Structures are given as C-alpha cells and as structure tokens.
C-alpha cells in the first residue's frame, strides 16, 4: 500500500539513493540513515513498516541493528543486504530474526517483491496484535453504535450465529460496516483468540488475488523467488473475511468453492492440497442472486456462502442512529484537532434528513471535514457541503426528539458501524 514507511540503513550513500529512488517510485515513504546508531534512534522516534539494513558498516553493523530493532519492536520485518554472499552471515541474520537476506546485486523486481511480502506479513501481525488487545473489551456490542430497531435485529442475529462455524454472507451498501459486523462475529466465537484476516477481493487483479489467497510455490511465475503462504493459511484457526466477494473472477470462484467443500487449498504452481481450518465470512454490496441469474457468479458458490445471510440496513433506513453517530464522530474529530465543537439544531436536522448514499463512512468524513474547516465552536448549516444542504431541503422532516446523547449512552455505543 502506498505510504508505508521504510527505513534504509547503509553507510554507502549511492546505495541509499538507489533504493530510495526505486521505492519512492512505488509510492513508499522512505527514510535513509548512514549508520546503525542513527537507525536505532529513528526506530525509537518513529514507526516503520520495514527496515532494510546493510550488514557491513563501520561501528554498529547490520546484525546489531537487527537485534536492536527487534528489541524495540519485534513485529518490524528487517531485511539485511550485503555486497557479498556469505552463507554463514545469512544463517546468522536469519537465526536472529531477519525476514530475508538479499544480495545488493539482486534485481529490482526481487527486491520489491521481498519488501511487499514483508509489508504484508507486518500488516497481518499488527492487526492481530491489535485485535487481541481489544478482545477483552468486546464481550457485548460496545463496539457498534446503534439503538434503532433495524440494527438491533442485526445484533440479535450476530449473537445467534457467532459461536457456530457456519459460513456467513453479509450484504449491504458500501460504508454500512460489513467488516465491523464480521469482526463482531469473530470476537464472539470460539475462534476469538485466533487471527482475524481480511482482504478486499475487488482491490487486486486476478493473478495477485489468487497468490494472496492461496499462496504460491517458488518458481511458479516470474518473480516467485520463494514459497509464499496464502492468507487462508495465515488465518489458520481463525476467521477469514472476504470483502466484495462478488468481484472475484470465475477461476477464483472455483478455488473458493473447493475451500468450502473440501476445506483445502492448492497454492499457485503447487500440486499438493493443503488442509485449512478457517471460518469464512464473505461480504458484498452487489445483488448476488441477480449476478447468479445473469451468469456472472457461480450458483453453487453462492449457495455455499449464503448459509446464514445478514443484511445490513443503509443509514437512511435507521435515521434514529444518526445523532448517536454524529456525537461519536464529533468526539473523535475534536480529539484529533483540539477544537471543541457542537452541532446546531438546524445542522442536525439537515443531516438526519439527508439520505447518505455513502452511509456511515460518508457521515464520518463530513463531520471530520466540518470540524477542521469550521472556525467557530459550532457546526452550522454553512459548515455542511452544499450537496447535503440542497438534498435535505424539501424532504419529509423527521420528528426529532430533543435528546442529547448521555454519557451513559455513549459509553455503550463507543465505536461506530
């Protein structure tokens, strides 16, 4: 993902420049330092997703950098590089926790692939560390905002199905909180202390998605320099959330069907099936039943996924929850900016009457924007985008009881859908 932060450690200026230029072209945020001591200081002062260090440096060498980085944050992948191949040095680095050992004359594509793999592993580790820390806080529905009848029905269904291994299909428009519902199910299940892994099937081209899901074996395609474990294996024992499953190709759909029927995968380029133990939750904003009728989605896969359907209502169908959500997002935004804000009655009514095509995600963005741009202590009609003011005018007014969200209420609803 562009914007991920990489630290390059090398006392050779030309190598720092070479790697920095290459990786910045890929969209990464790159920091370079020319000594081990500076590297350790940088890792203490800032968050990095990957560290790339030369082995042979004056003063503090790469092995010492590796050890120090791991002491500061054991989840950061450290890639070691050297101008000369040495089996002994490579083994020492890997034994001390290096993610990979590269020769400086390695091809650009190999370097980029190793970094990409390191970033993927780091992301999954960070997500699972965070989820485990949150686990004890999630014994009830404190993580979901909503008291409307529509969302309470969803809560009740989640409670009923959470502690089963049945496959679930969550349907709803973009921004309604499908992944949060998937996480709520995971937290309440017997798999709660195992990984929760998610992927957006519509965000990757078919060949990359296949490799991410099922893994690949060394040499299976250009650039496959080593075996890679797929996310189905990473999620072993836990829950795998497939977002936008309707965007998958026919070839991927066949492989997903095999997972559901046989509970096994075959990596790209592999021949031996590998058993997997995961609970599968899929989500879509498409009408999969129509996609099946139009021959754009496999009927057998649809029926395998749709064992327990959960339909999330759009925000316009649960307007009673809008004041709660606004109050919550207002608190988050003011914590970020240091500004204290409140919402005028007119602005509140306007937002309640707006249809929110982007649902909760759109509401969150609008509140953050208003807090940042508004110079007074109150969000008024003028603080809202013109499209919201215009589309709210003339709509049937919702009768809004004058009820401020109490601290007791917001303590219950403290994270949004």
Image: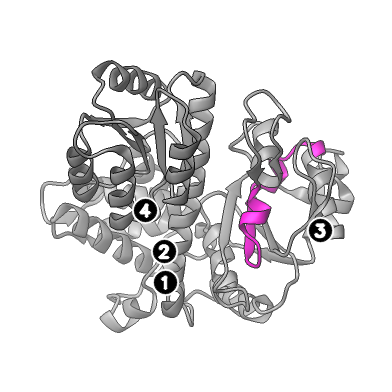
Q: Of helix, strand and loop, which one carries label 3?
A: helix
- Tell me the quarter of the picture where residue 209 sits: top right
**In the rendering, which numbered label is found on residue 130?**
2
Q: Are marks 1 and 2 in contact (CB under 8 Å)?
A: yes
Please give the residue where the numbered disc 3 appears in the rendered image. Answer: 260
Task: Note whether residue 417 is visible.
Answer: no
Spot occupied by residue 210 in the image (x, y as percentages of width and height):
70, 39
Q: Quadrant of the N terminus?
A: top left
Closer to the camera in the image, 301 or 399: 301
Which dot, 1 or 4, sits closer to the camera? 1
**For this rendering, which residue is in front, 283 or 235?**
235
Residue 146 placement (x, y as % from top left): 46, 72
Q: Which residue is mark 4?
A: 364
Front in this rendered view, residue 60 or 19: 60
First-in-chain label (2 vs 4): 2
Residue named by callout 1: 134
Spatial CA distance of label 3 from label 4 is: 36 Å
Q: CA distance from mark 1 to mark 4?
A: 22 Å
Toward which corner of the image does residue 59 lie, by quadrant? top left
Query: How many C-alpha atoms fall within 10 Å of the one at disc 1: few (<14), some, or many (≥20)?
Result: few
Residue 403 in the image, given as x and y percentages of width and height: 30, 77
Residue at x-position 30% and y-position 49%: 69
Q: Write down the region rendered in magenta.
A: 230-251
State left or right for residue 233 relative to residue 196. Answer: right
Residue 244 is covered by the magenta coloring: yes
- Name the element at disc 1: helix
Closest to the observer: 265 or 149? Answer: 265
Of label 1 and label 3, which has the lower sequence position?
1
Could you tell which of marks 1 and 4 lies nearer the N-terminus?
1
């Amino acid at each position: 993902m562009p914007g991920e932060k990489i630290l390059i450690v090398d006392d050779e200026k030309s190598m720092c420049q070479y790697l920095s230029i290459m990786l910045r072209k890929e969209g990464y945020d790159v920091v370079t330092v020319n000594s081990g001591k500076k590297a350790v200081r940088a890792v203490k002062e800032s968050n990095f997703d990957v560290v790339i260090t030369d082995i042979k440096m004056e003063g503090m060498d790469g092995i010492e950098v590796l050890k120090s980085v791991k002491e500061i944050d054991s989840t950061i992948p450290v890639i070691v590089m050297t101008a000369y191949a040495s089996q002994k040095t490579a083994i020492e680095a890997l034994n001390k926790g290096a993610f990979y050992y590269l020769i400086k004359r390695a091809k650009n594509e190999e370097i980029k692939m190793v970094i990409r793999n390191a970033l993927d592993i780091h992301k999954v580790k960070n997500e699972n560390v965070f989820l485990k820390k949150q686990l004890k806080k999630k014994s009830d529905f404190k993580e979901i905002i909503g008291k409307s009848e529509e969302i309470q029905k969803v809560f009740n269904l989640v409670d009923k199905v959470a502690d089963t291994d049945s496959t679930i299909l969550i349907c709803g428009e973009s921004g309604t909180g499908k992944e949060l519902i998937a996480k709520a199910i995971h937290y309440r299940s017997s798999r709660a202390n195992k990984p929760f892994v998610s992927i957006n099937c519509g965000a990757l081209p078919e060949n990359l998605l296949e490799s991410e899901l099922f893994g690949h074996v060394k040499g299976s395609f250009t650039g496959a320099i080593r075996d890679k474990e797929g996310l189905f294996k990473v999620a072993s024992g836990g829950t795998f959330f497939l977002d936008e499953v309707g965007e998958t190709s026919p070839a991927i759909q066949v492989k997903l069907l095999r997972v559901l029927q046989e509970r096994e995968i075959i990596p790209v380029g592999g021949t031996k099936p590998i058993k997997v133990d995961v609970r599968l939750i899929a989500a879509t904003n498409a009408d999969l039943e129509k996609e099946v009728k139009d021959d754009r989605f496999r009927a057998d896969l649809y029926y395998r996924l749709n064992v327990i359907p959960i339909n999330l209502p759009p925000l316009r169908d649960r307007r009673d929850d809008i004041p709660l959500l606004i109050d919550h997002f207002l608190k988050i935004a003011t914590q970020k900016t240091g500004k204290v804000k409140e919402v005028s009655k007119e602005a509140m009514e306007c937002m309640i009457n707006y249809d929110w095509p982007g649902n909760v995600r759109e509401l969150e963005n609008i509140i953050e924007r208003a807090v940042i741009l508004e110079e007074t202590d109150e969000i008024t009609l003028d603080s809202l985008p013109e499209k919201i003011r215009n589309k709210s005018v003339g709509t049937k007014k919702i009768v809004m009881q004058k009820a401020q969200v109490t601290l007791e209420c917001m303590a219950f609803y403290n994270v949004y859908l």
